[in-house]
């Protein structure tokens, strides 16, 4: 699958950036693409060690249904996973909640 167009990239980045405001530790969300996959990283306010790799989203062509793979630091790779809904796909926000919640804890609301 070809890389997405600029509008899709901007829309995904905007959605995730807005949703990431729930975590005060996250200062920036980065989205990078490769072969139909969006790789989601977080820049943390108090971390000089680089970006926190969170997850990979598979573009299905539907804005609310993305495949989900979690970055596992123990294996240093993305592994297909399920969201709390028990499904392997969902919204970008649900994927961010799952991955950021795992690595950063519950967001402050």
Image (cartoon, helix red, strand yellow):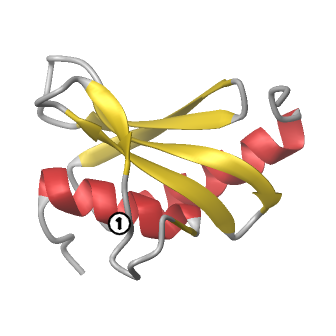
Residue bearing the label numbered 1: 97
**Residue that appears at 20% across and 37% down:** 45
Q: Is residue 66 left or right of residue 84?
A: right
Give the image location of residue 3, x and y in percent: 80, 27
Q: Height in image: 70 above or below 91? A: above
Residue 52: quarter of image: top left
**Residue that appears at 24% across and 18% down:** 50
Give the image location of residue 37, x and y in percent: 63, 35
Q: Nearer the viewer, residue 34 or 19?
A: 34
Q: In which quarter of the image is the N terminus?
A: top right
Q: Is residue 9 left or right of residue 34?
A: right
**Residue that appears at 56% across and 61% down:** 92
Give the image location of residue 58, x and y in percent: 62, 46
Q: Is residue 11 visible?
A: yes
Q: Height in image: 4 above or below 14? A: above
Mark 1: few/some/many CA within 10 Å (<14, 14-19, 20+)? many
**Residue that appears at 41% across and 39% down:** 28
For mark 1, give the secondary structure: helix
Q: In this view, does 55 lie to the left or right of 67?
A: left
Q: Quadrant of the C terminus?
A: bottom left
Give the image location of residue 77, x and y in percent: 31, 27
Q: Is residue 5 left or right of residue 23?
A: right
Q: Height in image: 85 above or below 93? A: below
Q: Is residue 21 visible?
A: no
| Total number of numbered discs in the rendering | 1
């Amino acid at each position: 699958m070809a890389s997405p167009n600029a509008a899709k990239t901007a829309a995904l980045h905007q959605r995730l950036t807005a949703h990431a405001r729930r975590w005060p530790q996250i200062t920036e969300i980065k989205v990078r693409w490769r072969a139909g996959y969006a790789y989601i990283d977080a820049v943390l306010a108090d971390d000089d060690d680089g970006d926190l790799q969170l997850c990979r989203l598979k573009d299905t062509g539907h804005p609310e249904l993305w495949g989900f793979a979690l970055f596992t630091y123990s294996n240093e790779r993305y592994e297909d996973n399920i969201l709390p809904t028990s499904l392997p796909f969902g919204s970008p926000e649900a994927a961010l909640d799952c991955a950021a919640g795992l690595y950063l804890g519950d967001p402050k609301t």
